[in-house]
Image (cartoon, rainbow, N blue to C red):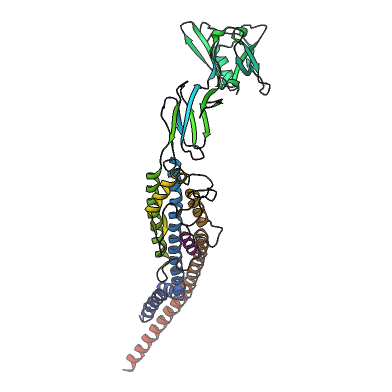
């Protein structure tokens, strides 16, 4: 900084001396500019040097913060794909699609599906066309269970009245039902016997429904659309049913075919039935995927350590005495021994060290593949359970680290460093602007003064020239 300031100041002074030594024809505007620059050069150079250093510090801190944030994000993405945990696999894929649940599964599970959840499908008697008037009045949907020839209403669910205007057609009624928000959809299907209204409810036995009609006295016809279980059975194309299945021999039901967390580590999407022939669900061994992930994690951590070492170098590092960098160093030092699964049972893996992560004396990391292999052999499912998106685990540990490091409200974090330096950078920018304004003000004042001086010098030169000519004339006469 001192060298830069001295150079600028010396340059401005040298130009000033050169101009003053010109002897005649002085450029007053240039002289004013050089004088103003000489006055403020050193201070502006100091501000520029400080700004450059702060920009370098912000860049270094931002790079480190970005590295840990990217590492946590990448871990989260990989955990969410499910290849690092025990993933369920089903022998008969026609029965169900299986996916990982919130917990971690292990062993084998049997699944026997006896029925799928279905929605009630009801049709109306055919009419000539979709544009044929079918009456006016009110249609009422009541919900409950349809069983055999009986309907049991759900007392907790209110009936839905749908107003049918005069001149209504099947298209009009379908639109009215769809707009009622009753949970029943309708459309018009035109077949060989004419146009029919198709009504479809939601999955589950409790979502059955009956259709009642109140006709307009002046425009009858809606009664033909009404339906109850005791009426025309042929109009009920599909009854509303629950899914029924046996999981590990235990009878279960579900109002939908999607069964979330049916068992630890297992969610189901039922797609078919297999009565009397149970299929088997097993869990994959995540060992190879975990080994690969730990190798990648170790490499990423070493890249971060290398960047941190460069930035905290006592003589050349931009963050050589920064509290945020020191905090990151401390957290990395204790990373391997941190409890990432504190609730695990005795003997189960709980730390990153159990996954083979090892901290070397120089602060770098290495992967103890022997220890990782032993952990995987002893408890492959428990090891896979460490790679979840829950409150605890490998991802949660790095996510917490990234949030702590990036917290702008913590003055001892990298985020706090960036916030503090950014504020200082703004202050220096304001000071530089103020200094430049003062320099320009001085330049303008000097230009004004020098302009008056130049006028006086010009007048003096004119007077001197007149006197000289008079003297020359007198001398000529004396000769």
Q: Is residue 333 above or below residue 274?
A: below
Q: Is residue 478 above or below residue 91?
A: below
- In this view, the residue farthest toward the bottom is 478
Total numbered badges shown on the rendered structure: 0
Q: Where residue 113 appears, x then y in whole percent?
A: 49, 23
Q: Is residue 283 above or below residue 346?
A: above
Q: Is residue 15 visible?
A: yes
Which residue is drawn at the image coordinates 46% and 59% (left, top)? 332
* Occupied quadrant, residue 25: bottom left
* Front residue of 197 and 210: 210
Q: Is residue 355 magenta?
A: no
Q: Is residue 278 above or below residue 426?
A: above
Q: Where residue 451 appears, x then y in whole percent?
A: 45, 74
Q: Where are the magenta residues, as a range?
A: 322-350
Magenta region, main secondary structure: loop
Q: Is residue 26 visible?
A: no
Location of the N terminus (image quadrant): bottom left
* Occupied quadrant, residue 303: bottom left
Which residue is drawn at the image coordinates 62% and 13% (left, top)? 211
* Front residue of 22 and 313: 313
Location of the C terminus (image quadrant): bottom left
Q: Where residue 420 appears, x then y in whole percent?
A: 52, 62
Which residue is drawn at the image coordinates 40% and 50% (left, top)? 374
Q: Is residue 335 magenta?
A: yes
* Front residue of 174 and 98: 98
* Front residue of 44 and 417: 417
């Amino acid at each position: 900084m001192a060298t830069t300031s001295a150079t600028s100041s010396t340059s401005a002074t040298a130009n000033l001396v050169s101009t003053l030594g010109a002897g005649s024809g002085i450029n007053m505007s240039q002289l004013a500019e050089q004088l103003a620059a000489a006055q403020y050069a050193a201070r502006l150079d100091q501000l520029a040097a400080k700004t450059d250093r702060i920009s370098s510090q912000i860049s270094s801190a931002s790079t480190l913060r970005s590295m840990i944030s990217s590492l946590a994000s990448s871990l989260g993405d990989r955990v969410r794909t499910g290849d690092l945990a025990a993933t369920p696999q089903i022998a008969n894929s026609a029965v169900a699609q299986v996916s990982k649940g919130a917990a971690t599964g292990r062993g084998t599970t049997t699944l026997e599906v006896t029925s799928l959840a279905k929605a009630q499908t009801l049709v109306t008697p055919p009419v000539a066309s979709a544009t044929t008037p079918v009456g006016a009045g009110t249609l009422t949907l009541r919900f409950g269970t349809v069983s055999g020839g009986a309907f049991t209403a759900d007392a907790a669910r209110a009936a839905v009245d749908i107003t049918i205007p005069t001149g209504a057609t099947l298209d009009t009624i379908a639109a009215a039902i769809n707009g009622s928000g009753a949970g029943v959809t309708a459309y018009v299907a035109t077949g060989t016997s004419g146009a029919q209204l198709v009504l479809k409810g939601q999955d589950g036995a409790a979502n059955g429904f009956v259709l009642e009609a109140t006709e307009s006295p002046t425009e009858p016809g809606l009664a033909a659309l009404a339906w109850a279980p005791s009426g025309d059975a042929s109009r009920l194309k599909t009854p509303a049913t629950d899914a029924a299945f046996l999981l590990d021999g235990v009878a279960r039901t579900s109002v939908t075919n999607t069964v979330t967390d049916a068992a630890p580590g297992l969610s189901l999407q039922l797609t078919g039935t297999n009565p009397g022939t149970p299929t088997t669900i097993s869990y994959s061994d995540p060992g190879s995927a975990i080994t690969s992930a730990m190798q990648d994690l170790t490499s990423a951590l070493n890249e971060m350590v290398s960047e941190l070492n460069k930035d905290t170098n006592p003589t050349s590092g931009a963050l050589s005495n920064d509290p945020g960098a020191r905090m990151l160093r401390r957290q990395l030092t204790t990373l391997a021994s941190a409890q990432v699964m504190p609730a695990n049972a005795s003997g189960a893996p709980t730390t990153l060290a159990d996954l083979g992560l090892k901290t070397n004396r120089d602060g770098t990391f290495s992967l103890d593949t022997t220890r990782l292999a032993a952990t995987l052999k002893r408890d492959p499912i428990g090891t896979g359970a460490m790679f979840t998106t829950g409150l605890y685990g490998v991802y949660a540990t790095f996510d917490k680290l990234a949030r702590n490091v990036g917290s702008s409200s913590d003055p001892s974090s990298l985020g706090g460093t960036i916030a503090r330096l950014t504020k200082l950078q703004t202050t220096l920018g304001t000071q530089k602007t103020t200094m430049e304004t003062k320099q320009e003000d001085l330049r303008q004042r000097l230009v004004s003064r020098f302009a008056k001086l130049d006028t006086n010098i010009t007048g003096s030169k004119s007077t001197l020239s007149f006197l000289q000519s008079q003297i020359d004339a007198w001398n000529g006469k004396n000769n």
